[in-house]
Amino acid sequence: MATQVFNKGVSRRRFLSGMVAVSAASVVGTSLLAPRKAMAAAETKANFTGEVLSGSHWGAFRAKVVDGVWVETVPFEKDKHPTTMIQGVREVVYNPARVKYPMVRLDWLKHGYKSDTSQRGDNRFVRVPWSQALDFFYYEMERVQNSYGPSALYAGHTGWQSVGKLHNAGTMMKRGIGLHGTTLAKMGDYSTGAAQVVLPYVAGAMEVYEQQTSWPLVLEHADTIVMWGSDPIKNLQVGWLVPDHSPYAYYDQLAEKVKNGDIKVIYVDPVVSSTQKAVGGEQVRVNPQTDVPLMLAIAHTLYTENLYNKEFIADYTTGFDKFLPYLLGKTDGVEKTPEWAEKICGVKADEIRALARQMASGRTQIIGGWCLQRMQHGEQYAWMLVVVAAMLGQIGLPGGGFGFGWHYNDAGSITSNGPLMSGFSGVTGMEPIHKGSFKGYSTFIPVARFVDCIENPGQTIKYNGQTIKFPEMKMAIFSGNNPFHHHQDRNKMIKVWRKLETVVSIDHQWTATCRFSDIVLPATTTHERDDIEQYGNHSNAGIIAMPKVVEPMYEAKDDFEIFRELCGRFGREEAFTGGKTQMEIIEEIYNGARLQGRGLGVRMPNFKKFWEGEGFIEFPEGTEWVRHESFRKEPDLEPLGTASGLIEIYCKTIADMGYDDCQGHPMWFEKTERSHGGPRSDKFPINLQSTHPKNRLHSQLCSSTEHRATYAVADREPVYINTQDAKARGIKSGDIVRVFNDRGQVLAGAVVTDDYMSGVCRIHEGAWYSPLEGGKPGTLCTYGDPNVLTQDIGSSKLAQATSAASALVEIEKYTGPVPAVTGFHGPTEITSINPLFPAMDIA
Ligand SMILES: Nc1nc2c(c(=O)[nH]1)N[C@H]1C(S)=C(S)[C@@H](COP(=O)(O)OP(=O)(O)OC[C@H]3O[C@@H](n4cnc5c(=O)[nH]c(N)nc54)[C@H](O)[C@@H]3O)O[C@H]1N2
Ligand SMILES: Nc1nc2c(c(=O)[nH]1)N[C@H]1C(S)=C(S)[C@@H](COP(=O)(O)OP(=O)(O)OC[C@H]3O[C@@H](n4cnc5c(=O)[nH]c(N)nc54)[C@H](O)[C@@H]3O)O[C@H]1N2
Ligand SMILES: [Mo]
């Protein structure tokens, strides 16, 4: 990197980028010349030696720091079930993928928003001073708002960012951009996009993110637990806030009860899950994407064998009479018998009957996961699971009924009596400067359709009873999320991305999203700034201080500082900060909880004592609780939030929307591609699971080199393959294989195992996209991003959610020259260019 002083005029760049005037002084970047330490504030951890208690999505830990360097991580002693992933967190600070400096894509620097966008992804970037990067950012927002209005600026995407009540990257973005102008927003999320739209109609609440019945009650009352496509042991390792991992103690107890024959646990899953391995029990190996036929056949058995609860159906549900003719084949001539289902789902008819009888024989807790609704017609699974539970008639009883959130956020733990902290707010109450017209376009888009929106401006789609008109997106801002991991069909995305004029990314890891951006700003990690967070998610077990562990690396700035400085460019710095320092806000957040605590009878020390003392407060334990109990006890006084106040087996509101792919009651719909004899399986016979990683949080920790080495195979992301499938293809564990379909191709490292049924493989989502030829659609991914292979279609017209789990592939042993993995080493830095006179310096 050349260390020239950027103090010349800006006229040429302004001319090239079509930007408004800026004073020369504001583009001078002293930071390139001064080492970081010299600029550090008074309270520095630069030479600190000692231990710091802090938190993360993976749990709380004590960081051992020697002379300003974080050297070791020890799980927090109160966490009795820490995850091994905690060892990968330290590396997030130090790994080679750190975003070190503000960077601008080479051709964007030369031509601004008129750049050659087909070069995106080639990873050539130029380092610029912070002040210049923020000027570019600001002028682009200004230009887009003035030229096109709010519908052309997309700043609504959210993601998993980091924990911390203050430094919430999504909130910072919303607050900062929101002070400038209104923008195109998003609706829903990738996690539960289908379930969270259909379940409020059916069960009156989203059901997915809510607390579940307390485990002690389930352990006491349940005879059978059915884990329907859910893997809590794997998925409870992480939390939206700092997880306390308290539910694991209950899974230990459950394992004991399974061993003693007190509780029977059944796993409906194509894979032997981590939970099955830890807890024990039996698997029902269902063909992927065919759970709805299996459930329909269970309902058929319950009905025809008179095993269903007629009183519950009569008192607590509506529309069974409209569903029944479908179940019995009166409406479509196909009776949903176990024999009918067997042909689709692969589970023997007798086994289906036995399962139905088992579920009806005593108290049965159904635990539903989310992967099954992250697929085409994903709404049907969620709806039908509620129907089966309603027929069993145990909703609202301890150890009975359905629950969709058991694998998430410490669910089933006992919620404490402590206060809840509120975070830094994403809204200020101040009117934005720009509030132009949306010109007939929608003000929001269903989040998983955002690439479709970029591709098809002006197009209309149906969504949840509304018509969405896609606007013409020109600029997009991403912070705290990584769309070039999380979105489906990478090669489609690469082509469509070219339509965007300017993309801004804020991150501390040089993700594929950074590669496909024009302006990249380096954020600090959680561990380079002060914060505060709730300890335990649903458990709300306490409050943990998260003091800075180490000084910020390179030129990283806190999201707070980035948006403060951005807002300064339009005179709204004070509005952004509220006139407060970071520490004052943290103290305010704490004091809010302290005040609330007084009302609850929970005494908390003053902030100084908390922060400078132990940095941890534990709340008193709460009481056990049963989901849906109040509705069951008093259906008239505590009705569900549905139109009828009852469980809607048939839903008139949905029926009236008139959608072919989501009708008035749950139904089986064939998929556009499905393994085990379904459409397209002749060409691509293997179902690709891209479930959530055992060793990561999505794409987070993938760039942790040493941690990655603990699970990577031949340097690649593992692909788990069934033994016979591997044998038929001459593949052994440890081989590099090519996984492909007509959407794309990736290399991965084979793990051959009987845990997977024939015709099913898995590559965990979040594996970093590592193109052989950056920016070229169809190029080989050298590491194994599964979203190179997934479909980008809506679940249905109801929810328009992601269909990531509806994907087929073929696998072959890779025999070509083995390319190095390209994803983890940051940008290719072009140093032969002066950012202020680009055209002069580049031949
Ligand atoms: N095929 C397939 N795809 C999927 C899924 C699937 O099952 N299959 N699952 C989907 C689901 S459920 C989800 S939730 C999404 C998750 O998708 P994302 O939320 O996009 O995933 P993360 O990898 O957590 O991305 C968070 C990004 O924020 C960055 N970050 C962390 N801390 C900070 C910070 O303090 N400031 C800033 N500015 N950035 C920060 C991280 O480095 C990382 O790049 O993926 C979805 N994609
Ligand atoms: N370790 C870890 N935990 C996480 C996350 C993470 O990234 N890492 N992410 C968190 C987030 S954001 C979310 S949204 C949740 C996701 O939670 P889920 O979506 O519930 O989790 P998945 O791991 O994708 O899949 C759960 C199970 O579904 C099974 N499955 C897949 N296809 C089928 C099918 O066709 N039929 C049946 N019956 N089963 C099927 C899989 O084999 C797996 O056992 O996890 C959270 N927990
Ligand atoms: Mo998620």
Image: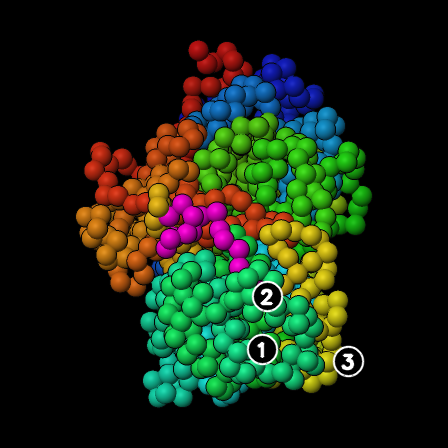
Mark 1 element type: helix
Query: In the rendering, at what x and y percent does residue 79 appear?
Result: 44, 72
* Residue position marked by numbered label 2 in the rendering: 330
Q: Is residue 146 magenta?
A: no
| Rendered-image quadrant of the N terminus | top left
In this rendering, which labeled residue sits more in front, label 1 or label 3? 1
The vertical placement of 816 against 802, above or below, is above
Looking at the picture, which amino acid does disc 1 mark?
A: Met
**Distance Cα–Cα, label 2 vs label 3:** 36 Å
Give the residue displayed 56% in from the left and 68% down from the top.
Answer: 327
Tag of residue 484? none
Labels 2 and 3: the sequence-earlier one: 2
- Can residue 96 be seen here? The reply is no
| Rendered-image quadrant of the C terminus | top left
**Lateral position of residue 743 relative to residue 143, left or right:** left
**Picture quadrant of residue 348:** bottom left
Looking at the picture, which amino acid does disc 2 mark?
A: Lys
Tag of residue 391? 1
User: Taken as a whole, is the magenta stretch helix, strand or loop?
Assistant: loop
* Residue position marked by numbered label 3 in the rendering: 637
Query: In the rendering, at what x and y percent does residue 394 appear?
Result: 58, 82
In this rendering, which labeled residue sits more in front, label 2 or label 1? 2
